[in-house]
Amino acid sequence: QKCDGFVQPEYKKFSIDPQITSFEMLQGILARAFDIKGEFMISYLAKDTEDQDVYLAMLSDWDMDAAIQCAADPCLRLKVDLKPFEEGLDDWDVIAPTDIPQHKVSTIADKGSILYSITGTISSQIGRSVTSMQRAMGFRGDDDFKPCKPPMSDSEFHNYLDSVGFLLKPQEFRLGIYQGGIEASLRRVAWRHLCNIYPANMTGRERFDYMKRKEKEYYHLREEWKARFSSDTATEEVKYVASMVKKDVLRTDRGHKFFAGSDDNENVVMLFHILVTYALTHPDVSYCQGMSDIASPILVTQKDEAQAYLCFCGIMKRLKLNFMPDGAAIMLKFKHLGLLLQINDPEFYAYLQQICAHDLFFCYRWLLLELKREFPFEDALYMIEVMWSTLPPDPPETELELTDSDYNVHLLSTSPCSPTFSFQQTVYAKLLAMRRLGSAQKLVEDTKFNGHNEEYDASTLTECSITVSEPSIKDELKERDEGLLELEPESDQHTQFHMSLEASGEATPPVAEQSTPKSDSGGFFGNMKRMLSSPKPIETPVSNSQSVNLPSPEEFGCGNPFLMFLCLALMLQHRDYIMSNNMDYEEVAMHFDKMVRRHNVHKVLFMARQLYTEYLRTQ
Amino acid sequence: MSGKRKPDLKVIIMGDYAVGKTSLVCRYIEDKFIKHEPTIGAAFFLKQWGPYNVAVWDTAGDERYTGLSHFYCRNAGAAILAYDMSNPQTFESLWARFMPLLNSSTEKCLKIVVGTKMDLIPPEERDITLEEGRKLAHELNEGLDISKLACEPYFETSSKDGSHVSEVFECIFQYCLPLSGDQRSKFGLSTSTVDLYEKEPKRATAKKGCC
């Protein structure tokens, strides 16, 4: 069955031999049959506990086995959905609800709502068997996991603004997003607030003027390095960064319509500009693989290079720690996640210990990219905004910094501007020269890169990521490392925010009607718990006394505690499958690798919100 | 789902960013050439080879992930060290970045040096010569008896057109997971891949085995 918006669904019937058909082959067959070029999801028709028809996601060979065994008809019915593109085609900002009535410029005709889904039915002549369906991940339809609150709409957003566009209730604004995300058409505006690009206390008009000024500032910064390319005075380092970024933007989210097509797609070029400008104006951070994944959803949402750059700077203020060569922030996140898993699910943790996977290194991509790649693109946008909404507002004091404090434009054309890549350049150049002279072996002996410890722990990672032997640089890195572990002294602000999150619920307009809170810790989270509670509690409820042992919200997950719970939810949803299949380390890693862009955002957020609420309750 | 076995061999692929590590594995396992997003951490592939299960670990190339690569090296039976033939710096990286990692954790690990993107560079423009490549490959395997290796531990490949890609893996598997001729024919494996490679005029003088 294929439906393309208004086009008639298309049905096809096939025979497959379940003995020899793998899930991958099935995907191939479907792609050919319906002529699908991009990504698509397969779901199969099954009966839930109340004998209702439900479509369950088919993600693996194992799901396919289950599907075949539980097929309710003599044939197995499959539905094929192309992931819809949301083209939020709006180019606007809220200046003030009243003073400028129609600042809404539709750049392209409104075809954004065309959800095209291809639905297909395949039949395979197989015998019926209802046995192993019980093993399937549950009979709840996707709808059961959807948030109770609809995504934040334009009119809801206006509730948080006063008549001149001043954001009156930044915390309630975030709470509203936490509960249901943001409507695609509002994302562009709302994300700018979540990215902390505006100083506090600005009216709509002031924000508008501020943006115009910062956009100019961005284009000026961009011009500084571009000019050095056109006059061919850029240093090798600058060229190196640009080549590295180029290689990555050419392969970042190219399956998304926004970046699709030829390599000179102007959106790909914009992503390139953003990342190169950031790398060169932030020499300490420079460019690192993974940053293109962070910038891509921001650009897709903002659709404007300069505005996306501002948001990217706002986000990187927090996330740059992930990309520091010392790896300290990431290691701390691994540690916290391990602690959380150990407390929540000792059985699974023990299992991972047994297969030597309790370092959780298979979660590396999750932590580094904050789960951006784990969900289909549009779902990732939703997950990202919900996660951002849990972070305390962190507006710039006077205005957003677009460069590092030690950025010096003259370094673009004179001497190296980053210890990281200048080191690499000089050492490689030296090595190449010496090697060709045949005396290079000695140099390696001399520099011997610290990376020799068999035992693997945090300090080793730190040690061997630093491929630097000059004492000055190493000391500097070490200092930074130490500074890192004692997180920024913003704890007061953090604590206040988390507490007010807890207390603000009753005053929040969009929250469902109040029933009597059962304790004084009720308030917003009491409501939320009722709102989200499932008929069946999650398998291993957190015991309060234990989760007290978790770090406080301002420390946990390096200041992003909700990410920890998202990761925990991902693991808990697969723990049964992993343990029943007796997977080893490689298989666990491979299993999660195959789940890239396939996790169910509603299920994961549903569980993560529950776990997070429970955690906040104990803090 | 039952009766599965643990992998008999772990092969790890390392090399600078964007040299085409993932493309190499995908050309071999899926026989296709598509654009891959940058690998973060590592990606994992399983391959059945005759009666054996092989796990291929494809690692991230970014320098800042070297620490994790070190971890991924654990228990690897073979390592593919990939460099981009059109970018000599990536060859030096093998030597500067990856050799120290491998020496420490995997002495018994077979190291195969693989040049990628051969299709991009005309022979007369190459910076790294065949001899340099082989020299590095032999240096990397010092201390390891590679006399049983059916070919040079150095390959020049193109994942785009598929040149010499399966030879890399065949060479590794034959060394690490020896099969008798009977077993090979039983599992329908070709017995001539390495010979085909040797037939190329350019490599006709190549000696078999260790120098």
Image: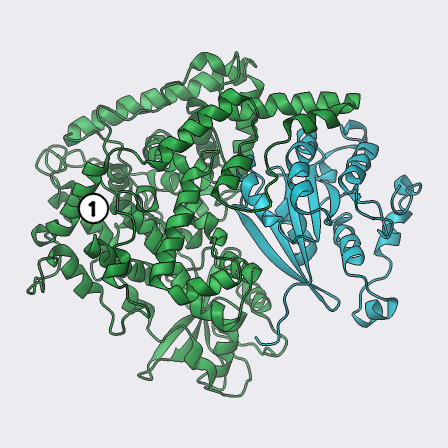
Residue A538 picture location, percent across and down: 30, 69
B153 left or right of A317? right
Residue drawn at (76%, 53%), measured in percent from left and top? B172
Q: Is residue A601 visible?
A: no
Residue drawn at (72%, 46%), measured in percent from left and top? B107
Q: Is residue A40 depicted above or below A97 in this figure?
A: below
Residue drawn at (76%, 50%), measured in percent from left and top? B168
How many marks overall? 1
Q: How is the image coloured?
A: by chain
Quarter of the picture containing the N terminus of chain B is: bottom right
Residue A506 picture location, percent across and down: 8, 54
Q: Quadrant of residue A295?
A: top left
Which residue is the site of mark 1?
A174
A70 left or right of A429? left
Q: Mark 1 belongs to which subunit?
A: A
Q: Colour of chain B?
A: cyan
Residue A579 picture location, percent across and down: 48, 70
The residue lying toward the viewer, choosing from B131 and A558, is A558
The residue lying toward the viewer, choosing from A141 and A89, is A141
Q: Is residue B164 visible?
A: yes
Q: Is residue A442 depicted above or below B58 in this figure?
A: above
Callout 1, which amino acid?
A: Arg
Q: Is residue B164 depicted above or below B29 in this figure?
A: above
Q: Is residue A618 depicted above or below B185 in this figure?
A: above
Outermost right residue: B205
Residue drawn at (19%, 51%), measured in percent from left and top? A176
Residue B141 picture location, percent across and down: 78, 43
Which chain, by letter, is green? A
B88 left or right of A568? right
Q: Secondary structure at mark 1?
A: helix
Q: Quadrant of residue A601?
A: bottom left
Quarter of the picture containing the C terminus of chain B is: top right
